[in-house]
Image (spheres, rainbow, N blue to C red):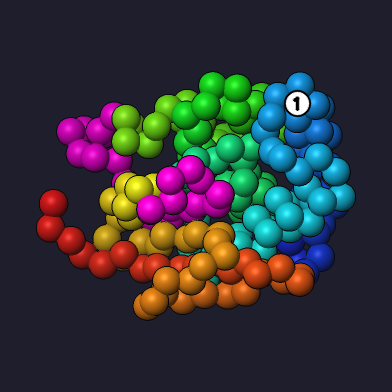
Amino acid sequence: MVSPYVEGATLLPALYAQLSTYLDLLVKWNARTNLTSIREPEEMVRRHFGESLFAGAQLADRVTDGTTLLDFGSGAGFPGLPIQLSRPELAVTLAESQGKKASFLREAVRTLGLKTEVWAGRVETMPPVAGVKREFDVVTMRAVDDMGRAVVEARGRVKAGGWLVILTTEVPDGVEAVRLPGDGHGWVTFEQVGSRVE
């Protein structure tokens, strides 16, 4: 499905308004809580919002209505919240173990009127559903602590045939990668997780 908010490379007014509200909320909260080390709104737009929306656009051919997406270590909501805003048909869960950041995510979801779930805890503590470990069609990550350990845990949360999507500066062997726009050294990597024995 084509997003009702993005046409080509142009943000449509409804998405622009929601992103503006999200930015205002981020700037307000960031003044008293360290949600992101980036303080300038223009840089937040370029780095956080732009890179997240770009990653979401790269997912277009890999997701359908109802696709489940876990944003692992969501922090201030990147890339999960901009992806949710641009793709409202996805079922997005934002996982964040730091209490103040999780509180911000709940406030952002409420303010923006989203159906997005916020898991205020470590991903590995997510309870099973009907006795089965909770898995997602897509797991996204960006700037998480202990990336090596986090990637292992994130990979284990991807359904067989699903995608692990990482915004990173290093591209591991054997994964698809698309360079982020701009003059940085960032990439969006896509690893399709195959069948595995539990």
Highlighted magenta segment, given as a residue range? 127-148
Q: Residue 102's spot in the image, x, y percent? A: 56, 27
**Circle 1 — which element?**
helix
Residue 175, by quadrant, is bottom left
Say which quarter of the image contains residue 113: top right
- Residue, x 71% and y 40% (percent of image)? 37
Q: Residue at x 76, y 70 (%)?
A: 182
Relative to 23, say whether 102 is above or below: above
Q: Position of residue 129 (x, y in %)?
A: 26, 34
Q: Is residue 106 magenta?
A: no
What amino acid type should be assigned to the residue bearing mark 1?
Answer: Trp
Q: Position of residue 75 (x, y in %)?
A: 58, 37
Q: Which residue is mark 1?
A: 29
Q: Is residue 52 above or below residue 101?
A: below
- Within 10 Å of the Cα at label 1, are there few (<14), some (14-19), or many (20+) other Cα atoms? some
Decide if residue 118 is in sight here.
yes
Residue at figure coordinates x 62%, y 40% from the top left:
77
Q: Visible in this render: residue 1?
A: no
Image spot of residue 73 (x, y percent): 49, 40
Q: Is residue 196 above or below residue 24?
A: below
Viewer-closest of 116 and 44: 44
